[in-house]
């Protein structure tokens, strides 16, 4: 493998709802078709979690060898449900035991949050190292070594953010560059009201904490990459706006647009090269004609 000259790009994106108004969240929660005019693409309920499951595990695709799940199962919805039971069941039982009225008891915390307009049911994080141009000439064997790198990234994330519990981690090799989809739950503990343990995305992932998390994660990623590939790569310099949260849909659109622009640039470069070649050919023809004229005998 050839080392890059300008460094590797790294992206760590937390899927989020861009429109945080109460009306937007309510619309996204209640819309049966999961469509809304509001910009709200976080995993707020079981319907949206089902869409993530369908996309991440490529339920519609026969090329399953290009999808690698490194944590969890082939059903992300069940993975998240199981994680809810593991993390919140004791707190739910403790809370219910303190209630004197049955209507205040929580039957199932997973479904309670799915129906709640104030909280997201789960979080999705997408991690990518290297862009389309970096990976386009790499072999499948070289790409598949990223399984080891991304496996380390899951462990790193759990160490750096112990309040975030991973339910499922799946790698996609069927697009322009390998990338990792992580689905999990952000948890806040020692709550004063309600259950002592609750979901807490906005508590765990703030603008300030995200910057620290992203910086630590990229340091760990390039270290793992160099160890596994036996290289000494560097990361590209941090770009402005890198810490902005976007939805997974937006990230895919961004990547598609970026790739199309690069393809257009490559096509333009080829056209410029062809024009230069044509120009040189014409210049050579003109020079040849001039030489022949000068060599012709004078009458």
Image: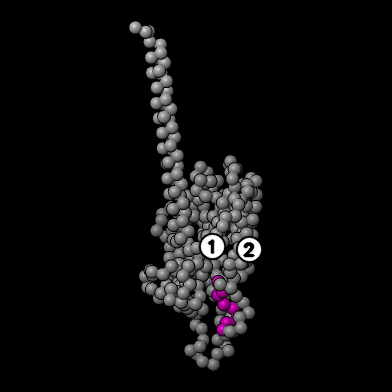
| Colour pattern | one colour
Q: Please state, as top left, top right, bottom left or bottom right, where the N terminus lies in the image.
A: top right
* Viewer-closest of 9 and 268: 268
Farthest residue, direction front: 299
User: Residue shown at 43%/49% (left/top)?
Assistant: 260
**Mark-to-mark CA distance, 1 and 2:** 13 Å
**x%, y% of residue 89?**
56, 78
The circle drawn on residue 212 is 2
Q: Please state, as top left, top right, bottom left or bottom right, where the C terminus lies in the image.
A: top left
Secondary structure under tag 2 reads: helix
Prevalent SS, magenta region: loop
User: Residue shown at 58%/41% (left/top)?
Assistant: 2
**x%, y% of residue 107?**
49, 82
The circle drawn on residue 203 is none
Query: In the displayed structure, would residue 128 be above or below residue 16?
Result: above
- Circle 1 residue: 244
For residue 147, say whether it is visible.
no
Q: Is residue 172 magenta?
A: no
| Numbered marks: total | 2
In this picture, which residue range is highlighted in magenta? Answer: 194-201
User: Residue shown at 39%/58% (left/top)?
Assistant: 60
On the image, which quarter does residue 3 sit in?
top right
* Viewer-closest of 80 and 264: 264
User: Residue shown at 58%/67% (left/top)?
Assistant: 207
Secondary structure under tag 1 reads: loop
Left or right relative to 133: residue 7: right
């Amino acid at each position: 493998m050839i080392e890059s000259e300008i460094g590797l790009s790294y992206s760590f994106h937390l899927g989020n709802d861009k429109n945080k108004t109460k009306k937007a969240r309510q619309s996204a929660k209640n819309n049966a078709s999961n469509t809304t005019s509001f910009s709200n693409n976080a995993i707020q309920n079981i319907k949206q979690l089902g869409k993530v499951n369908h996309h991440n595990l490529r339920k519609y695709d026969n090329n399953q060898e290009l999808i690698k799940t490194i944590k969890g199962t082939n059903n992300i919805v069940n993975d998240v449900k199981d994680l809810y039971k593991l993390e919140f069941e004791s707190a739910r039982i403790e809370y219910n035991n303190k209630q004197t009225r049955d209507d205040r008891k929580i039957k199932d915390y997973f479904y309670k949050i799915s129906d709640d307009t104030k909280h997201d049911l789960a979080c999705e994080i997408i991690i990518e190292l290297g862009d389309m141009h970096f990976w386009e000439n790499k072999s499948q064997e070289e790409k598949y070594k990223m399984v080891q790198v991304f496996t380390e990234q899951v462990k790193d994330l759990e160490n750096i953010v112990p309040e975030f519990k991973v339910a499922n981690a799946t790698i996609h090799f069927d697009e322009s560059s390998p990338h990792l989809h992580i689905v999990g739950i952000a948890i806040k503990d020692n709550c004063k009201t309600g259950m002592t343990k609750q979901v807490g995305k906005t508590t765990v992932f703030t603008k300030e904490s995200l910057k620290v998390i992203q910086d630590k994660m990229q340091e760990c990623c390039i270290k793992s990459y160099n160890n596994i590939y036996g290289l000494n790569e560097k990361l590209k310099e941090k770009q402005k706006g890198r810490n902005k949260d976007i939805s997974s849909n937006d990230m895919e659109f961004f990547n598609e647009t970026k790739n199309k622009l690069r393809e257009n640039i490559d096509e333009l470069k080829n056209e410029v090269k062809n024009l230069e070649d044509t120009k040189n050919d014409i210049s050579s023809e003109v020079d040849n004609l001039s030489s022949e004229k000068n060599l012709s005998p004078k009458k």
